[in-house]
Image (spheres, helix red, strand yellow):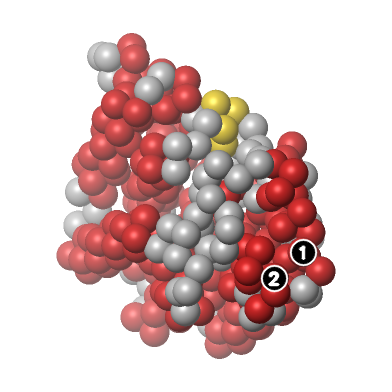
Amino acid sequence: MNYTTVYKILHNDLKSIENRLEKVLETESPLLKQSSLHYLQAGGKRIRPILVILSGKFGNYDIEKIMDVAVALELIHMASLIHDDVIDDAYTRRGRPTVKAKWDDKVAVHTGDFILAKSLDIITNIREHEVHKILSKTMVELSIGEIEQIQDKYNFEQRFTTYFRRIKRKTALLIAASCQLGALAAGAESAVHQKLFRFGYYIGMAFQITDDILDFTASAKKLGKPVGEDLLQGNITLPVLLAMENPEIKREIVQVQETTEPEVLERIIQLIKETGSINRSIDVTHLYLKKALHILDELPDHEVKPLLHTIVKFIGDRKF
């Protein structure tokens, strides 16, 4: 079984979520509607809605209730991407122009705000107080992670713990919340939704580290953005931190700035690869995925467990 198979199995529910996402973003403003739908229509892995659905199966599954959680979380993710592109001055995402590139920074900021507001409106359909508490805490942590990334731009002296804390806040917690809130909204037992949170946290950490690896190893076509863009923008990731343990390589890396010429960046990327930091980073992702599988073993027997196992395998097999 692969990720595409999981998508096909969940096709009907995912289609319902997709339709709801489009409906939620309906607005009387033509410009706001176009900019809001821009990323949605670009597609994506929809890993958060898939995790909400699969986690919801551990309780009293009701697609109408689960859908509200899945839509709210996907909207939060979309809003964060739009705001990220403004902060990073990014012009492409998934091979398409960003909202800021197609329109401008002001439209992008207001579009992100609109989508975020819509997510908050949707989640009010869920009555469970704990759902709101977890979601609000997740959004606070996400915002802190974004600020930390800005503060740490071109900070080549940051610690490994700084990096791991940042990706926890920026990526892992929203994926963890997708697992926990899907189960919680479906009335799953406390022990179950807490374990699903930990499962989501571990795969979320692995997912982000894999993204950071792919920034150096994938093609520009596959990335939908230039290779090494994170480093060029001053975002110091795990492969870079590990490579800088070599003093000679570090002296090269710390020279990188936004105006670094492409051929210079290409040479530095090659140096990073030669240190073995890519393989060491892959080993870290495998450690997180091993922990996720251990949690999966602890969950009650259910027909969706093989599907969750496939998600873990998908993250581990993403092409480097």
x and y, in percent, of residue 297 in the image: 61, 85
Q: Earlier in the sequence, mark 2 or mark 1?
A: 2
x and y, in percent, of residue 223 in the image: 68, 43
Inter-mark Cα distance, 2 to 1: 7 Å
Kindly tell me whether residue 100 is visible in this rendering.
Answer: yes
At 60% from the left edge and 84% from the top edge, which residue is drawn? 291
Labels 2 & 1 near each other (Cβ < 8 A)? yes
Res 21 → quadrant: top left
Q: Quadrant of the C terminus?
A: bottom right
At 69% from the left edge and 79% from the top edge, which residue is drawn? 246
> Neighbour class for label 1 at 10 Å: few (<14), some, many (≥20)?
some
At 23% from the left edge and 46% from the top edge, which residue is drawn? 120
Q: Quadrant of the N terminus?
A: bottom right
Which residue, given by chain and number where applicable, does mark 2 sit on?
Answer: 249
At 25% from the left edge and 66% from the top edge, which residue is drawn? 137
Q: Amino acid at mark 2?
A: Ile
Instruction: In the rendered view, tell whether residue 90 sits above or below residue 198.
Output: above
> Neighbour class for label 2 at 10 Å: few (<14), some, many (≥20)?
some
x and y, in percent, of residue 39 in the image: 49, 32
Instruction: In the rendered view, tell whether residue 145 sits above or below residue 76.
Output: below
